[in-house]
Image: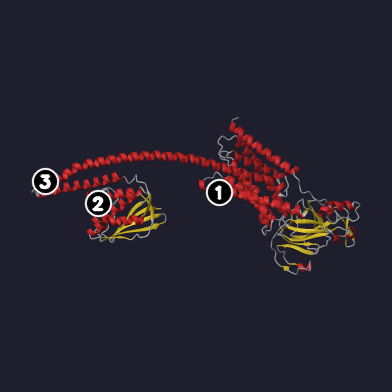
């Protein structure tokens, strides 16, 4: 086995073993919130003695510690009984087991004082010394979320209301509140109640009225989630509130971390235009939404069923993301997408569970468990195949993340929901996945940056070499052009002089005309060679671009050409009076504008030439306009040796101008008509 395979195998096996050990440790060794044992004996109610555990569920403060949970509740379906009142239809419900609550009803929690007849009464008093304040033992009861609206009474007092119960008249149950609610509205929240118990033995009674009685009237949508699904906590104020607050802090902290990881993954994917992080984005999104939904459920919310549905569905989203990362297709069989689709179906089933009836939801829960088990097995198989995959595009960290997810999903099938978060192994495995993904993001980002740095360095060296080669080629070309133009101009100049002598001596009109044509062509070639020589000498293409104030440039051009324009009866106007900067080659732009102005003086038959400037998004446009005769629209004046009158008399001036402008990443265009011609020199704005 190669080192690469061995490294991956050790990493994945270590991750799986550590995840399993975490689950075992937290499930068996971590301190749990234990159930408060149901008390024994009887309680007097309306001249009758009710047997605790058979007729009524109750706990006694002698069995309370620092913190515990109440697992039994007295329940009356379809009725709202008054505070401190029992009903013949009352039944005892175990909150640790699944139970079909009615759409509305009453929940009653009974917390009794010490038994004054107990033989060890003094010993019980001493055990409760830490809870004593004045003449009372003080305890805090935390009521979890009640689906989906509730009114809470402590003894005969209305102490909390969340949402509204349909056609509910408070005056029937309390004289301190006379409002009536007509329409149902949902809202849930965790409620803290302060319970006080008198400490003097001689004043204690065994009657129902002497106990702390919490009566909850609730109304739900009639779905699977009705009444109460979690156990109330009871104990000292600091212990009860501390456990819940710590759980909420952990949920929001890791939710924020997951959200940051999600945002970084999305931004990196967008910047790189890559699908490399697509699967990680899916499972991190699932973890983020899972933690956020649990956090929102712990506070005040009017969307209880929605957040519950999201919380149930996200485990399948996380599973689907892991399958998407490591899954494989075999030939034409899309195995990966089959299991991903199955996870999507599981997410849909889980999401609709809170909104349907108890029976239908129970069937869907079984289907969800089967889908989750199949998905966990498939993911484990994908992880095994990934260990020996030759082309490892995903990396060890992504395989490790998938391994943690596989262990967490498998554990969630067999483990009950554990509260609070700090002792919930599934929560810590989700947090570990988020952290591992966070680390992998930065490792990938660092690798990308390192690769980009090397690429940038190599490209920089390559550009330097190519620039050096281009400069050498340009220098060689310019030397050749200067040499050719200089040496060719000499014989042509001699030819022009000879033509002048011949014209002076010649008497034949036809011969004079022929010699004049030869002279004219020679002068045209000399003019073109002069332009080429100037172009080669100044080397506009090799000139470096810099920031130039175009108003100053236009003022300089106006100064250069004002005299020539006036001498030809042309008015030169400069309308550029505000500073606008462009990124240009100064000598090159001067040559181009001068060439256009000279062409207008010589060929346009104009009376006015105007310089103007305008901004167009990230461009600065210099305009040179004349009011002359215009240019034939059928001509491509930017081609060499093209002339409006005769192609044989054309030059290379505008062709060179266009090349100079394009070397600055600009463009040279024009518009022409009967009212004149305007050249547009588009330049980069600085």
Q: Residue at x 77, y 56 (%)?
A: 141
Structural distance between the alpha carbons of marks 3 and 1 = 83 Å
Q: Nearer the viewer, residue 247 or 70?
A: 247
For the residue pair 554 and 628, the one nearer the viewer reads as 554
Residue that mark 1 sits on: 266
Q: Position of residue 325 (x, y in %)?
A: 59, 42
Circle nearer the N terminus (3, 1): 1
Residue beneath label 3, please? Answer: 502
Mark 3 and mark 2: Cα distance apart in space: 29 Å
x, y percent for residue 440 = 59, 42
Q: Quadrant of the N terminus?
A: top right
**Which numbered disc, 1 or 2, marks the residue that appears first in the sequence?**
1
- Residue 178, image x and y in percent? 75, 69
| Element on which disc 2 rests | loop
Callout in the foreground (3, 2): 3
First of labels 3, 2 by sequence position: 3
At a point 29% along the width and 44% down the height, the residue shown is 537
Question: Which residue appears at 61% of the width and 47% of the height?
Answer: 284
Q: CA distance from mark 1 to mark 2?
A: 58 Å
Of circles 3 and 1, the one toward us is: 3
The residue that label 2 is drawn on is 643
Pick the front one: 660 or 486 = 486
């Amino acid at each position: 086995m190669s080192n690469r395979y061995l490294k991956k195998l050790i990493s994945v096996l270590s991750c799986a073993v550590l995840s399993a050990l975490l689950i075992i440790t937290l499930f068996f060794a971590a301190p749990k919130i234990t159930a408060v044992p149901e008390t024994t004996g009887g309680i007097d109610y309306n001249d009758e003695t009710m047997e605790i555990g058979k007729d009524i569920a109750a706990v006694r403060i002698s069995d309370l510690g620092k913190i515990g949970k109440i697992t039994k509740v007295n329940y009356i379906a379809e009725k709202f009984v008054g505070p401190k009142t029992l009903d013949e239809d009352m039944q005892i419900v175990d909150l640790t087991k699944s139970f079909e609550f009615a759409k509305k009803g009453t929940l009653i929690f009974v917390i009794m004082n010490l038994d004054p007849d107990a033989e060890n009464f003094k010993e019980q008093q001493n055990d409760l010394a830490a809870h004593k304040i004045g003449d009372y033992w003080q305890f805090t009861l935390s009521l979890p979320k009640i689906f989906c609206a509730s009114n809470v009474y402590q003894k005969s007092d209305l102490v909390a209301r969340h949402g509204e119960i349909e056609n509910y008249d408070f005056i029937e149950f309390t004289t301190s509140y006379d409002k009536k609610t007509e329409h149902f509205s949902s809202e849930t929240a965790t409620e803290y109640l302060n319970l006080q118990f008198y400490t003097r033995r001689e004043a204690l009674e065994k009657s129902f009225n002497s106990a702390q009685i919490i009566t909850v009237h609730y109304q739900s949508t009639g779905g699977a989630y009705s009444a109460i699904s979690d156990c109330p906590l009871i104990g000292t104020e600091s212990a009860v509130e501390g456990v819940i607050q710590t759980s909420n802090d952990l949920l929001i902290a890791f939710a924020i971390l997951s959200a940051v990881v999600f945002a970084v993954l999305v931004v990196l994917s967008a910047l790189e235009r890559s699908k490399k992080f697509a699967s990680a984005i899916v499972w991190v999104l699932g973890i983020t939404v899972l933690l956020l939904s649990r956090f929102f459920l712990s506070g005040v919310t009017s969307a209880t069923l929605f957040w519950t549905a999201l919380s149930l569905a996200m485990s399948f989203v996380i599973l689907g993301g892991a399958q998407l990362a490591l899954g494989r297709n075999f030939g034409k069989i899309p195995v990966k997408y089959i299991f991903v689709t199955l996870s999507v179906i599981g997410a849909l089933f889980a999401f609709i569970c809170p909104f349907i009836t108890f029976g239908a939801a129970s069937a869907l829960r079984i289907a969800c468990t089967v889908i989750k088990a199949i998905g966990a097995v498939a993911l484990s198989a994908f992880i095994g195949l990934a260990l020996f995959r030759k082309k490892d595009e995903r990396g060890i960290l992504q395989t490790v993340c998938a391994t943690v997810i596989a262990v967490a999903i498998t554990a969630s099938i067999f483990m009950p929901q554990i509260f609070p978060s700090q002792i919930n192994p599934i929560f810590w495995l989700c947090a570990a996945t988020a952290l591992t993904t966070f680390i992998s993001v930065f490792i990938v980002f660092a690798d990308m940056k390192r690769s980009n740095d090397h690429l940038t360095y190599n490209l920089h060296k390559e550009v330097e070499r190519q620039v050096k080669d281009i400069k050498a080629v340009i220098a060689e070309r310019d030397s050749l052009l200067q040499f050719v133009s200089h040496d060719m101009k000499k014989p042509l100049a001699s030819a022009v002089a000879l033509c002048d002598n011949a014209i002076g001596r010649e008497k034949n009109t036809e011969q004079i005309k022929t010699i004049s044509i030869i002279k004219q062509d020679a002068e045209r070639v000399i003019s073109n060679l002069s332009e080429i020589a100037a172009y080669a000498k100044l080397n506009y293409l090799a000139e470096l671009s810099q920031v130039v104030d175009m108003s100053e440039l236009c003022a300089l051009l106006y100064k250069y050409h004002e005299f020539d324009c006036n001498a030809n009866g042309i008015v030169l106007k400069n309308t550029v009076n505000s500073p606008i900067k462009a990124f240009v080659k100064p000598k090159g732009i001067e040559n181009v504008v001068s060439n256009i102005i000279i062409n207008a003086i010589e060929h346009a038959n104009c009376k006015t030439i105007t310089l103007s400037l305008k901004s167009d998004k990230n461009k600065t446009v210099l305009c040179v306009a004349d009011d002359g005769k215009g240019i034939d629209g059928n001509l491509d004046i930017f081609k060499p040796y093209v002339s409006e009158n005769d192609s044989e008399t054309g030059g290379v001036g505008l062709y060179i101008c266009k090349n100079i402008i394009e070397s600055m990443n600009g463009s040279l265009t024009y518009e022409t008509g009967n009212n004149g011609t305007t050249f547009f020199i588009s330049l980069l704005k600085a």
